C-alpha cells in the first residue's frame, strides 16, 4: 500500500510540475521581449522545474571518466549541428521566422540577465526532465522522457523550439542513460545554451 501511495504522490508531483512549468514557459515567451514580465516568468519556469525535481526526491549526479571535458565537447558538437541546420533554415521562411521570434527575446534584453535566465532554465530542465521524469519514465526512459520534454516545449507554440527539443532531448537522455545521472547532460545543455546565445542571434539578425 505504501508503495502505491508513494507512486501516486510522485505522479502528482511530476504532473503538477509539468502543468505549471508549461504554463509559465508559454506565458514567458509571449511576454514582450526584454520586459520585466519576460524575466519574471522565465525565472519562475526555472524555479518550477528545479523545485519539482527536488520535491520528487534525490537527483543522481551520475559518473563519468571525463566529467567535464566530454559533456562540454558534446554540447559544442550539438551546437555545431544546430548552427549548420540554422544556416539551412534561413531559406525556409516559417522556420526562419520562428527562430527569430525566440531570439528576439534574448536580443531585446540586457546581457547578464539574459545569460543567467537562459543558463538557469537549461540547468533546471535537466534536473526535472533528465532527473525526476527520467527516473519515473518506466522501461523506456530515453523515449518517454524525451517525448514529455517535447510536450512541455510545445507550450511555447514555436515549431523551431519543438524541433530542437526533440533532438537535444534525445542526446541528453542518452547521456543520462550512459552516465547514470544529470551532471553530464546538465553541462552539455548549459554549454549548448551558452553557444546558442552567443552565436545564433547574429545569424538571424535582420539586414
Image: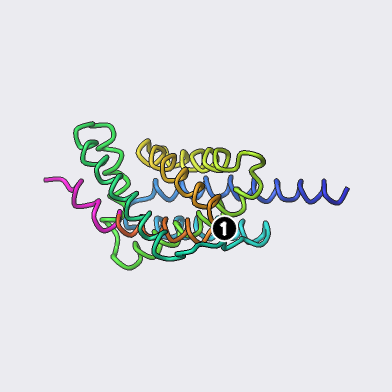
Q: Secondary structure at mark 1?
A: loop
Name the spot of residue 176 as percent of width and height, x first. 53, 52
What's drawn in magenta, residue-wise? 196-207
Q: Residue at x 53, y 60 (%)?
A: 47
Look at 29% across and 42% down and name the residue there.
99
Q: Tell me the quadrant of the picture where the C terminus can be found.
A: top left
Q: Quadrant of residue 66?
A: bottom left
Q: Which residue shows up at 41% across the image and 57% down it?
A: 188
How is the rendered protein coloured? rainbow
Instruction: Judge from the rendering whether residue 37 lies leftward or rightward of residue 15; answer left or right.
Output: left
What residue would you read off at disc 1? 181
| Rendering quarter of residue 121 | bottom left
Residue 102: where, in percent of width, then height? 32, 46
Name, please, the residue furthest toward the right.
Answer: 1
Judge the density around disc 1: few (<14), some (14-19), many (≥20) Cα neighbours within 10 Å: many
The location of residue 157, given as percent across then percent down, is 41, 37
Q: Residue at x 48, y 39 (%)?
A: 150
Q: Which residue is more in the foreground, 150 or 76?
A: 76
* Viewer-proximal residue among 67 and 20: 67
Rendering coords of residue 23 (x, y %) = 52, 46
Q: Is residue 140 left or right of residue 102?
A: right
Q: Based on the picture, tell me whether residue 185 belongs to the magenta stretch.
A: no
User: In the figure, is residue 77 to the left or right of 56?
Assistant: left
Q: Residue furthest left?
A: 207
Amino acid at each position: 500500500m505504501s508503495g502505491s501511495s508513494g507512486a501516486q504522490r510522485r505522479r502528482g508531483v511530476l504532473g503538477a510540475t509539468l502543468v505549471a512549468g508549461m504554463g509559465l514557459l508559454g506565458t514567458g515567451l509571449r511576454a514582450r521581449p526584454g520586459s520585466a514580465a519576460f524575466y519574471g516568468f522565465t525565472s519562475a519556469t526555472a524555479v518550477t522545474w528545479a523545485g519539482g525535481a527536488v520535491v520528487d526526491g534525490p537527483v543522481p549526479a551520475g559518473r563519468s571518466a571525463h566529467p567535464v571535458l566530454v559533456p562540454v565537447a558534446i554540447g559544442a558538437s550539438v551546437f555545431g549541428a544546430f548552427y549548420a541546420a540554422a544556416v539551412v533554415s534561413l531559406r525556409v521562411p516559417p522556420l526562419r521566422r520562428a527562430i527569430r521570434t525566440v531570439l528576439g527575446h534574448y536580443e531585446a534584453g540586457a546581457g547578464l540577465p539574459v545569460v543567467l535566465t537562459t543558463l538557469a532554465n537549461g540547468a533546471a530542465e535537466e534536473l526535472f526532465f533528465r532527473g525526476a521524469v527520467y527516473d519515473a519514465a518506466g522501461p523506456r526512459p530515453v523515449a518517454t522522457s524525451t517525448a514529455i520534454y517535447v510536450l512541455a516545449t510545445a507550450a511555447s507554440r514555436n515549431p523551431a523550439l519543438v524541433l530542437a527539443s526533440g533532438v537535444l532531448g534525445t542526446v541528453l537522455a542518452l547521456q543520462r542513460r550512459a552516465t547514470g545521472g544529470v551532471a553530464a547532460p546538465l553541462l552539455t545543455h548549459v554549454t549548448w545554451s551558452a553557444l546558442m546565445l552567443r552565436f545564433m542571434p547574429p545569424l538571424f539578425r535582420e539586414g
